[in-house]
Image: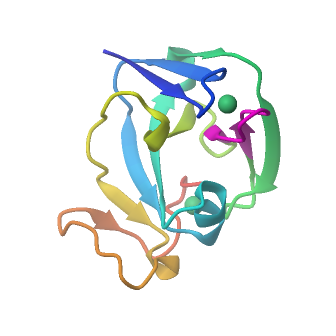
Amino acid sequence: MTHEAKCQCGQLSLTCEGEPDFVLVCNCVQCQRRSGSAFAIGAFFRRDNTNLSGTHKKWSRLGSSGQPLINHFCPDCGTNLFWAPKVRPDHYGVAAGCLTSTVKEPETAIWMSEKLPWLAFPEPWVKHDKGVAKSG
Ligand SMILES: [Zn+2]
Ligand SMILES: [Zn+2]
């Protein structure tokens, strides 16, 4: 199956072949800021399987790993469509809320230490207080 992620105005899109290798929820404060929401859902697709269309801008910050993480966003509407953690050179994290189709349920939640207090995630998920070694 082919998934497509689109920004709000629609000029920027990322098509992703196949299914994401993994889907995770991140509760870190930076992801709260980036998404403007309680947590972020990242669907991680192999970069080789993605195709970008439209113009985009980049903004880089240091991830919790100490390695850069580059956010790619639409210069018109500001949607942060995907991000490229240096610690995961083969994958893009795609904002799952921007996908036009559904991907599998997340199986992992990271940065539980920064989670909003009223949130609870399903019992079977693997939970980490901080990032996992390659969470970015
Ligand atoms: Zn846009
Ligand atoms: Zn995060």
x, y percent for residue 99: 43, 32
Q: Is residue 81 magenta?
A: yes
Would you identify the image quadrant in which residue 43 lies? top left
x, y percent for residue 109: 38, 63
Q: Quadrant of the C terminus?
A: bottom right
Would you identify the image quadrant in which residue 54 lies? top right
x, y percent for residue 46: 50, 26
Q: Quadrant of the N terminus?
A: top left
Q: Is residue 80 left or right of residue 1?
A: right
Looking at the image, which is closer to me, 41 or 127? 41
Q: Where on the image, by quarter, is ligand 1? A: top right
> Which residue lies at the image location 52% right of the left edge and 78% below the top edge?
114
The extreme bottom residue here reads 117
4 to 41, vertically: above or below: above
> Which residue lies at the image location 74% right of the left edge and 61% below the top edge?
66
Looking at the image, which is closer to me, 15 or 107? 15
x, y percent for residue 127: 34, 69
Q: Is residue 104 left or right of residue 109?
A: left
Q: Is residue 76 magenta?
A: yes
Q: Main secondary structure of the magenta part?
A: strand
The extreme left residue here reads 124
> Which residue lies at the image location 49% right of the left edge and 36% below the top edge?
98
105 to 2, vertically: above or below: below
Range of magenta residues: 70-84
Looking at the image, which is closer to me, 133 or 37? 37
